[in-house]
Amino acid sequence: MKTSAPASSANLGPGFDALALALDLRCEVEVELSSGWDIEDDHDGFIRLAAERVGHGPLRVRVRSEIPVGRGLGSSAALLAALELAMRRLQGKPEDRRAVFEAVSAAEGHSDNAAAAVYGGLVAVGGGMVNHLELHESLSVVVAVPDEQLPTGEARSALPATVSFGVAARTGSRVVRLVESLRTGDLELLGGVGRDEMHEPYRISLRPVIGRMLDLAVGAGAPFAAISGAGPSVLAVVTDETRDAVVTALAGAVGNGSVLVPAVDVEGVG
């Protein structure tokens, strides 16, 4: 049974745990019932744990993924979504995307990457709801993936327990401007969103390369750039006119990493 799910870039700056964008880098899994557990290249045991969470073993599992691991691109949510759907098919259950989304959200502990991996596109989550948002056709993304990891647990542990009233108010304003500018393609409004205050400064302190990449992207003409998920990857929103300059600028900062220009995935898990 073969299924796949896309990568995702969560948060998008001020939309912490609320916004995510699905990217056309896919994680494909193949699952079969087996007489014993058979999983290739599962060096840290994560695939086995994920497979045990979604199904009744033992299983033969094969994973082929284009998604960099530990870089803030939703690799775990994509794997879980693909495994969950594969097991539902294998067990003859309905292909209920809502059920897949709820299972992945529960396993991840937050819903932004789960929503993008399951439903595709630009999504907003909150209160158990998933809403699709519009992304203007003139906008695309560049993703800089440095040659170092930032585990989600480490990135979350660096965050403060509370933020000031001022930070909360400015963050709300930024989210409104971000969503509207992504919908309309208004570059002036998008450029006015600015740098997030709520979580990004703390993550930049863990991996200073993040701050350098954000500065390089904006300096090269990206109207908006943000940490992708927990980092250390950075996502820059670009136009046809600015894409090449942003790619070139970021290429000098990723070391042995890579600069990707993925399309937005609109299919989700399947």
Image: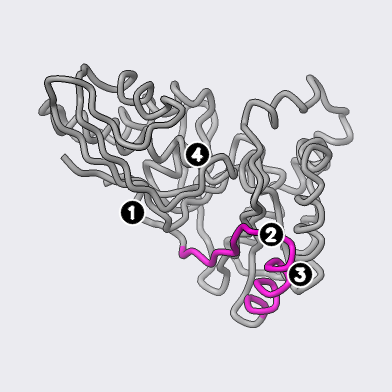
The answer to whether mark 3 and mark 4 are in CB contact below 8 A is: no
Q: Earlier in the sequence, mark 1 or mark 3?
A: 3
Magenta-colored span = 242-263
Measure the alpha-carbon separation of dots 1 and 2: 29 Å
Q: Earlier in the sequence, mark 3 or mark 4?
A: 4
Q: Which residue is mark 2?
A: 254
Element at label 2: loop
Q: Which residue is mark 1?
A: 267
Q: What's the residue type where badge 1 is placed?
A: Glu
**37 horizontally vs 26: left or right:** left
The answer to whether mark 1 and mark 2 are in CB contact below 8 A is: no
Residue 49 higher or lower than 90, as above or below: above
Residue pictured at 23% horizontal, 22% vertical? 37
Measure the alpha-carbon separation of dots 4 and 1: 14 Å
**185 horizontally vs 1: left or right:** right
Q: Which residue is mark 3?
A: 188
Q: What's the residue type where badge 2 is placed?
A: Val
In the rendering, at what x and y percent does residue 196 appear? Answer: 78, 46
Element at label 1: loop
Q: What's the residue type where badge 3 is placed?
A: Glu
In the rendering, at what x and y percent does residue 137 appear? Answer: 51, 71
Identify the image quadrant of residue 79.
Answer: top left
Measure the alpha-carbon separation of dots 4 and 2: 23 Å
Q: Which residue is mark 4?
A: 113
Nearest-to-viewer mark from 1 and 3? 1
In the rendering, at what x and y percent does residue 71 appear? Answer: 59, 44
Q: What's the residue type where badge 4 is placed?
A: Asn
In the rendering, at what x and y percent does residue 19 appear? Answer: 58, 43
